[in-house]
Image (spheres, rainbow, N blue to C red):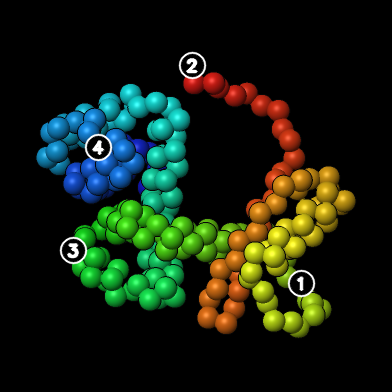
Amino acid sequence: MALQFSPKTFFRLLPGPLLKDYFTARGHGNSLPSDLPESSAYIDHLYKWWEALPTEVRDQMEAELRGVHEIAASDTGLSTVFEEAEFHGRADELREAFSKLNTLHEKMLWTHLHQPRIFEVANIFEWTDNLSSRYWRKCTGLLKRAPKDNPAARNDLAAALREYHLRREDRGRNCHVDAYKRGTDIYYFAFLEDYARLGVTFDNK
């Protein structure tokens, strides 16, 4: 069973220099604790530093690191990353970099830092491939036409989905469509706005 994500546990899974590379890339390297040796004392100092960051900064980085943890903890995460790297002709570059890294968490964080597009798309496919079957709906009887992935086609699809869901469910007032190629196939991912909701919120003050 994969470990649940928590920042302190995540920090323990990675070497100090790679964590420093990540925080430096996010503009916070200069304020890191100076005692970089990999020890429990360093992790404690790092976590205190982390907790003292502005909430909006910490939340953004936590979302990124959670994504790294989830794909590293997946049984298929590494192969999904290599599939995306193969598509872009960067698989050999990843193999060379990974040969110097020890764990899946190290490899995924390196990819997130140095090949963000590959990581982003691999994460989307990994999430989709592991959805429960109750989320899938198979459509048949569609016209056989060559798929398009240009901006105009994506905008047309977003507009059609928006109209359909507004008419049937009164939701989806905003819709964004991305398209990703895999060989001769094109995968479309539509991100639809859900219903407006009321709830408890915190203003970080």
Real-space CA distance between mark 1 and mark 3, rounded to the nearest whole angstrom: 45 Å
Q: State whether residue 95 is above or below residue 7.
A: below
Of pointers 4 and 3, the one earlier in the residue sequence: 4
Closer to viewer: mark 4 or mark 3: 4
Q: Which mark is residue 29?
A: 4
Q: State whether residue 89 is above or below residue 23.
A: below
Closer to viewer: mark 1 or mark 3: 3
Which residue is rendered at x = 40% and y = 57% of the image?
116
Of pointers 2 and 1, the one earlier in the residue sequence: 1
Which residue is rendered at x = 39% and y = 26% of the image?
54
Residue 196, position in %: x, y?
A: 73, 35
Q: Amino acid at mark 3?
A: Lys
Q: Amino acid at mark 1?
A: Cys
Q: Can the viewer see residue 73?
A: no
Residue 130, position in %: x, y?
A: 54, 61
Closer to viewer: mark 2 or mark 3: 2
Q: Amino acid at mark 4?
A: Gly
Closer to viewer: mark 4 or mark 2: 4
Q: Quadrant of residue 63?
A: top left
Real-space CA distance between mark 2 and mark 1, rounded to the nearest whole angstrom: 48 Å
- Residue under circle 3? 100
Q: Amino acid at mark 2?
A: Lys
Q: Secondary structure at mark 4?
A: helix
Instruction: Say left or right for 97 vs 146.
Output: left
Mark 1 Cα shell of 10 Å, populated few (<14), some (14-19), many (≥20): few
Q: Which mark is residue 205?
A: 2
Which of the pair 66/161 is nearer the observer?
Answer: 161
- Residue under circle 1? 139
Furthest-top residue in this view:
205
Q: Quadrant of residue 88?
A: bottom left
